[in-house]
Image: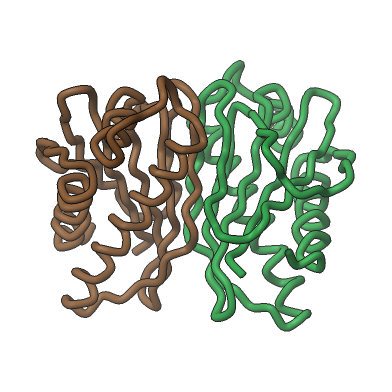
Chain colours: A green, B brown
Amino acid sequence: MRVEFINPFLSSMLNVMSTMAHMELTPEKPKLKKGETSMGDVSGLIGMISPEAKGSLSITFDAPLALATMKGMVGEAPDEINDEITDLVGEITNMVTGGAKRLLSEKGFDFDMATPIVVSGENHAIHHKSKGPIVVIALRGELGKAYIEFSFDE
Amino acid sequence: MRVEFINPFLSSMLNVMSTMAHMELTPEKPKLKKGETSMGDVSGLIGMISPEAKGSLSITFDAPLALATMKGMVGEAPDEINDEITDLVGEITNMVTGGAKRLLSEKGFDFDMATPIVVSGENHAIHHKSKGPIVVIALRGELGKAYIEFSFDE
């Protein structure tokens, strides 16, 4: 696993949430996913392809945290996950991956991003199926947790 | 929407299910997704990138159909969605996309595939967030439905 990938994805996520939604999340220590499952209610997923490696990223939110993020961005939010929220999670996924892409490009690792897919459904679980280890970073907000996960074939 | 993309994905799906799991699925008429939501219990998702377009594909299964697919492939299956099933759905997603990639390459459209992500969770919904229309093809099996969906930025 490329440890140098962790900070670009983490700092991009913290930056997007802070600047777009005025929300400060507290990251827990990044770790390798082994057996345990991160569950959530709405997730943004995106594929990444570089000449050296292929991979996938997911950002999974508890519903109350996703709704609070919308409220932080535009001042109001629906009562439950709807198309506005899945659009927002898709945009956050694009922005976080785009920010990490710029940071990683400075380190000489260039990748292209596919288009995001958003999954909604109470308590779903995400399983990255690349060949490499899966890095998971939990982030705590006042109203719930988010998880960034990524994995590359290597 | 590129109508010529439909048959490569559909015929690759029918071929994978038939040859790997001895399962004949009956496709319904492909259509553009407008408002309605395909729900399922386990989904394989993958990103696609070409010089001309970026996109995403999903294959969503009802749980009984996913379990029957495992049984068709290896003779036995667990009682519920577990890691074996999510591995299988990830492999099917890779095989279907790889088959479509070969067929589309013959038509002069080349794309690269990212690595698959599998989502598990009762009744989740998939929302493709590329800029183009979303094509959805429902497939009926004896024990449930599957849905192929794909979308490209254009």
Where residue B36 sits: x, y (%)? 30, 28
Residue ID at (88%, 41%): A28
Residue ID at (30%, 50%) = B133
Count of labels in the image:
0
Residue B105 at x, y percent in the picture: 23, 76
Quadrant of the rendered structure where residue B145 is? top left
The image quadrant where one finds the C terminus of chain A is bottom right
Residue A138 on image: x %, y % = 79, 39
Looking at the figure, which quarter contains the N terminus of chain A?
Answer: bottom right
Foreground residue among A145 and B133 = A145
* Residue in the image at 89% along x and 39% along y: A26
Give me the residue at 28% from left, 34% from top: B75
- Asked whether, in this view, residue B40 is left or right of residue A66, the answer is left
Q: Quadrant of residue B138?
A: top left
**Viewer-side residue, B114 vs B86:** B86
Q: Is residue A129 visible?
A: yes
**The residue positioned farthest toward the front in the image shown:** B75
**Relative to B96, does residue B32 appear above or below in the rendering?**
above
Say left or right for A121 vs B144. right
Q: Nearer the viewer, residue A47 or A29?
A: A29
Picture layout, residue A45 above or below residue A119: below
Q: Is residue B100 left or right of residue A97?
A: left
Q: Nearer the viewer, residue A152 or A66?
A: A152
Q: Is residue B10 visible?
A: no
As drawn, which residue projects farthest toward the top? A79
Quadrant in the rendering for residue B125: top left
B49 over B132 or under it: above or below = below
Image x and y of residue B43, in percent: 41, 38
